[in-house]
Image (spheres, helix red, strand yellow):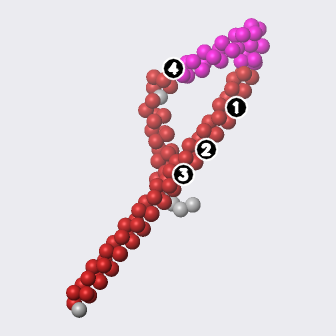
Amino acid sequence: MAFEKLSRSIHDLNDNIQAYIHSNSEYYKLKAFKNGMKGATSLVRFLVLGFLLSTAGIMLSFALAIVISEAIGVPSSGYFIVGGFYLLIFVLIFIFGKEPIEKLVLRKFSKAVFNDKEE
């Protein structure tokens, strides 16, 4: 009788441990999916906003190049000036911008993925 009671308790303990492990694994799967989706939606949002911003930048650059060309009187000079400005910006970012850009991107994505506030 005592042996049956002990055997039943061990069997119940085994069932409870298996249920706990299953629940725990399901929880972490769901949490990983939630964090992955937050990261993915942040990435898509970043790409869409980047596309729109670069399209606006291209249009404004063409407009500025035309205005500079008309002001100087040489048709291609505005395009060379605007292109040279962007080349200068590129070189400065290439030399000095690696660490600040990495920090900015890491901070933004960390907020998106690890922010545990329920929305």
Q: How many marks?
A: 4
Residues at marks 4 and 1, CA–CA distance in whole angstroms = 22 Å
Residue 17 or 69: which is nearer the viewer? 17
Asked if disc 2 and disc 4 are in contact, CB closer than 8 Å, the reply is no
Residues at marks 3 and 1, CA–CA distance in whole angstroms = 28 Å
When asked about the image quadrant of residue 78, the answer is top right
Residues at marks 2 and 1, CA–CA distance in whole angstroms = 17 Å
Determine which residue is flagged by label 1: 56
Q: Give the range drawn in magenta.
A: 65-90
At a point 60% along the width and 43% down the height, the residue shown is: 44
Instruction: Tell me: 71 left or right of 45.
Output: right
Identified by mark 2, the residue type is Arg
Q: What element carries label 1?
A: helix
Identified by mark 1, the residue type is Ala
Category of crowding for the residue at label 4, using alpha-carbon neighbours closer than 10 angstroms: few (below 14), some (14–19), many (at least 20): few
Q: Which mark is residue 91?
A: 4
At a point 31% along the width and 74% down the height, the residue shown is: 14
Asked if disc 3 and disc 1 are in contact, CB closer than 8 Å, the reply is no
Residues at marks 2 and 3, CA–CA distance in whole angstroms = 12 Å
Instruction: Tell me: 95 left or right of 80.
Output: left
Q: Is mark 2 on a helix, strand or loop?
A: helix
For the question of whether residue 112 can be seen, the reply is no
Choose the circle earlier in sequence order: 3 or 1.
3
Q: Is mark 3 on a helix, strand or loop?
A: helix
Determine which residue is flagged by label 3: 37
Q: Where is residue 83 in the image (x, y as percent from the top left)?
A: 63, 17
Identified by mark 3, the residue type is Met
Camera-nearest label, 2 or 1 = 2
Looking at the image, is 73 positioned above or below residue 46?
above
